[in-house]
Amino acid sequence: ENEGIIGDYINFGDVAAECVQDEERDADGAVMRHQDDVFLLICPQSMVGVDASIIQPLSDMVGAAGDRPVILINPSLADRPSSNGQQGVRGRAERLAFAESFRTVYHARCMYDSSTGYFPILGMMLRRGANEPWVAYQRRDLADGIGEAYVPLLATERDYPDGAEINDAYARSGDWEEKKL
């Protein structure tokens, strides 16, 4: 009945509605408690070249979870091209709307010049909580050459700032040449 359970706390399963555990009901059929209280999904994403999107099974799972929290850690819910074009135009608006229905609570991402790869790290974007601002930091080497500091350049209460806003903030810092972040 509880295959995959570890102790009384954690269940493992796929991203699917059928993996949402049933509730315990009283004699009148009222829900007394849910077997699963919270759903924590790590790195849900659609794969390039695969004929199925993660969006539909994830949407079904969120629907089956009802009002219980569904937390995504490091998701990538963007459309990916499938091998035979199934994730093309049809249904794209609905997939994007579902992906946008999640709210970013915490975010940390290194920023680097995309033309050089993942090094050197130029700075980072950080959001420390649901009611916290998005902050762009610039990485600076310390004067003694040992270590580094991250200096805040931009903070915004609204959505994630776009690349132009971030580049402008870096340009205003005085020690910056235009980069493609």
Image (cartoon, rainbow, N blue to C red):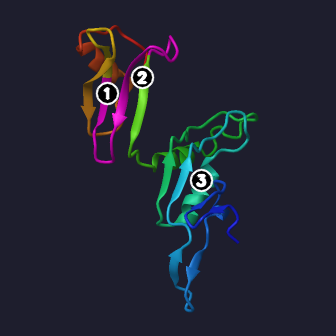
**Image position, residue 82 (x, y; %):** 70, 35
Crowd band around label 2 with a 10 angstrom C-alpha radius: few (<14), some (14–19), many (20+):
many
Rendered view: 37 above or below 43: below
- The residue indicated by pointer 1 is 136
**C-alpha span from label 2 to label 3:** 29 Å
Q: Amino acid at mark 3?
A: Leu
The magenta span reads 113-137
Rendered view: 106 above or below 140: below
Would residue 122 appear left or right of 175 to someone viewing this image?
right
Dot placed on the residue nearer the N-terminal end, 1 or 2? 2
Checking the image for residue 161, the label placed there is: none
Q: Secondary structure at mark 1?
A: strand
Q: Amino acid at mark 1?
A: Ala
- The residue indicated by pointer 2 is 111
Q: Amino acid at mark 2?
A: Met
- Is residue 121 one of those drawn in magenta? yes
Would residue 57 appear left or right of 117 to someone viewing this image?
right
In the image, what residue occupies the spot 46% across and 66% down? 67
Q: Mark 1 touching mark 2, by CB under 8 A? A: yes
In the image, what residue occupies the spot 56% across and 87% down? 29
- The residue indicated by pointer 3 is 58
**C-alpha span from label 1 to label 3:** 31 Å
